[in-house]
Amino acid sequence: MRGGAAPLAPLHYEALVRRELAVDLGSAGEVTSDAIVPAHRRAAARIAVRRAGRVCGLRCALFAFETLGPVRHAVEHEDGADVPAGAVLATVEGPARVLLSAERAALNLLAHLSGVATATRDVVEAAARGGPARVVCTRKTTPGLRALEKYAVRVGGAANHRFGLHDAVLVKDNHRLVAGGVAAAVARARAATGHLVRVEVEVDDLAQLREALDAGADAVLLDNFTIADLRKAAAMARGRALTEASGGITPETVAAVAATGVDLISVGWITHSAPALDVGLDFDAS
């Protein structure tokens, strides 16, 4: 798979797809199709993209159709494929009512996840023009979609930051205030967590960076630093801690950020604000 992402496990999307179908169908089902489409009528349709992008979430979409009835499919482009406008990703064939009833739930997930993967791909490619820094996502994800959006980020060629509050220590500005400073926060984090847990500290300026490095932080998050200060910070931390640039980074600025020598670049909008890829379901003429 392009982007280096392992295929998504069904347990990560099956319950979500069923919930989306339940919301759409409610207690009465698809009243329009049930009223005008004979129960015995079968149909075939193509899942196609309207503009170029990177595919992600196809198996989620196909599962939506298969959940409602006996639908056969043929895949043309798997997750991770870069496709041109008009490309057919898969074909589906089965009861017409089933295809019509599952259409919106299937396309919503496919369009959103493909949008995340496409936006991520574009940022990764732009960053590579500046240096070897690795692009990562954040916890700024759509409620209920974190596992899927982080999968889409991997499909797009970037890496995941922590999945939640449970799998890494990130001392942010409010933590510093409550704990009484960076040194105290890092010391307490070291005492309370296992040896495999990294401790990262968010810093706002070079003075706080020095404090975090002296406290023994494994990584430092450089929040809204200027390009000049990012360059200084990367030099100061080299060999002592990983550096992560964050804050307002766009495809137009990411190459300059990467060129400063930071190790990581975190981008929140690739999950919470990526534009959906336009995807449609085109029925074959009967």
Image (cartoon, rainbow, N blue to C red):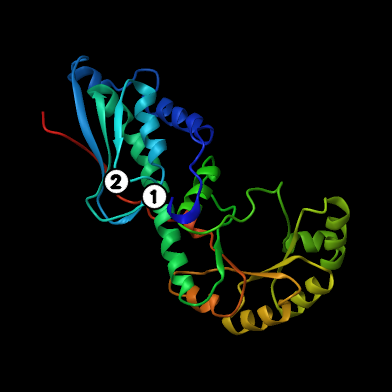
The amino acid marked with disc number 1 is: Ser
Residue drawn at x 24%, y 28% is 93
Residue 130 place in picture, x, y as percent: 49, 77
Classify residue 103 by image quadrant. top left
183 left or right, relative to 111? right
- 217 vs 236: above or below: above
Q: Is residue 53 left or right of residue 271?
A: left
Above or below, comparing residue 275 to residue 110 in the picture = below
Q: CA distance from mark 1 to mark 2?
A: 9 Å
Three-letter code for the amino acid on which mark 2 is drawn: Val
Tell me which residue sits at (85%, 67%) in the image.
Answer: 183
Quadrant of the rendering where the C terminus is positioned: top left
The disc at residue 98 is none
- The residue singled out by tag 2 in the image is 279
Residue 233, compared with residue 100, is above or below; it is: below
Most extreme residue toward the left is: 286
Q: Secondary structure at mark 2?
A: strand
* Category of crowding for the residue at label 1, using alpha-carbon neighbours closer than 10 angstroms: few (below 14), some (14–19), many (at least 20): many
Element class at badge 1: helix
In terms of sequence position, does the residue under pointer 1 or pointer 2 come before the other? 1
- The residue under label 1 is 114
Q: Give coordinates of residue 22: x percent, y percent.
A: 42, 25
* Residue drawn at x 51%, y 79% as measured from the top left: 256
Q: Toward the viewer: 184 or 56?
A: 56
Q: Nearer the viewer, residue 90 or 136?
A: 90
Percent of width and height locating residue 170? 72, 58
The answer to whether the residues at label 1 and label 2 have Cβ atoms under 8 Å apart is: yes
Q: Within 10 angstroms of label 2, few (less than 14), some, or many (20 or more) residues?
A: many
Q: How many marks?
A: 2
* Image spot of residue 197 (x, y percent): 77, 54
